[in-house]
Amino acid sequence: MTMTDETDIKTKILLSAKKLFAVQGFDGTTIRQICEEAGVNIAMVSYHFGGKDNLFGALFEAFIPNAQLSSVDPNMPPVIGVKLVIREVTLYRLSDPQMISIIQQEISMNSPRIQKIREHVMPMWRLLRKWIAEGREHGLFQFRSLDTAFMSVAGTLLFHRHQEYWKVLLEEDTSDVEATIEDMTEYILHGLQYSGE
């Protein structure tokens, strides 16, 4: 097997696992189902990943923009930082709804796998919290509780999506990504009582 074949098989397994975990959940998905979806031999998960738990972790290595996150300047002005997080989380949420679904399922179940999720996404959430706190210190934001403000922003970013459940109440076309980002930025900054422009 060539290196290209190996990479191709790993990619097929990762994409199949992501798809099935998003729909059926981690516990509701078997290795056999993943391999059938990927069209590969069942032994390939053990060979490439060492089991289902390691495969779950590999999803976060493959599909979370870790390099991009590590290149963010933590010392940028707080309003610019908050706007950056709003933009990047919204773009990511829209570009990879399967990963968002997996993350939300695992958090809501408080599964043992949330530690793996934390390793990859907490650096960004820590930056967001830091920028919200700095914004208040500089008089740019006004709110009573940092925890409440942070959780409200994180909740808005993570759970704003067009699920089947909400379709009966939604009327607007949401295909304009830039308009969505602009609306969310305005909403969040108003919630933080931003004193700027």
Image: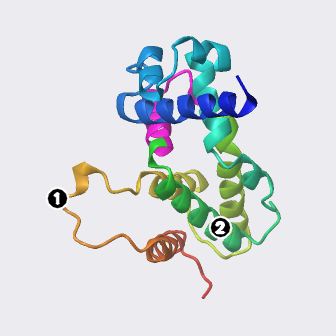
Residue labelled with disc 1? 168
* Residue 62 screen position, x and y as percent: 65, 39
Check disc 1 and give the amino acid type: Val
Q: Residue at x 66, y 30 (%)?
A: 5
10 Å crowding of disc 2: few (<14), some (14-19), many (20+):
some
Q: Picture coordinates of residue 26 (x, y %)?
A: 45, 24
Total numbered circles = 2
Q: Residue at x 57, y 29 (%)?
A: 114
Tag shown at residue 56: none
Q: Quadrant of the N terminus?
A: top right
Residue 130 sits inside the magenta stretch: no
Q: Which residues are magenta?
A: 99-114
Residue type pointed to by label 2:
Leu
Quarter of the image with the C terminus is bottom right
- The front one of 126 and 16 is 16
- Taking 16 as reference, is 97 above or below it? below
Q: Measured from the top left, where is residue 186 in percent x and y?
A: 49, 76
Against 162, residue 66 (above or below) is above
Residue 192 locus on image (x, y percent):
54, 69
On screen, residue 122 versus residue 76, left or right, reads left
Judging depth in this view, the residue of 113 and 22 nearest the camera is 22
Q: Which residue is mark 2?
A: 84
Furthest toward the bottom, the residue is: 197
Is residue 121 at all visible to an observer of this figure? yes
Identify which residue is drawn at 25% across, 50% down: 164
Q: Residue at x 45, y 58 (%)?
A: 156
Circle nearer the N terminus (1, 2): 2
Q: Secondary structure at mark 2?
A: helix
Near-viewer residue (39 or 127): 39
Residue 104 lies in the magenta stretch: yes
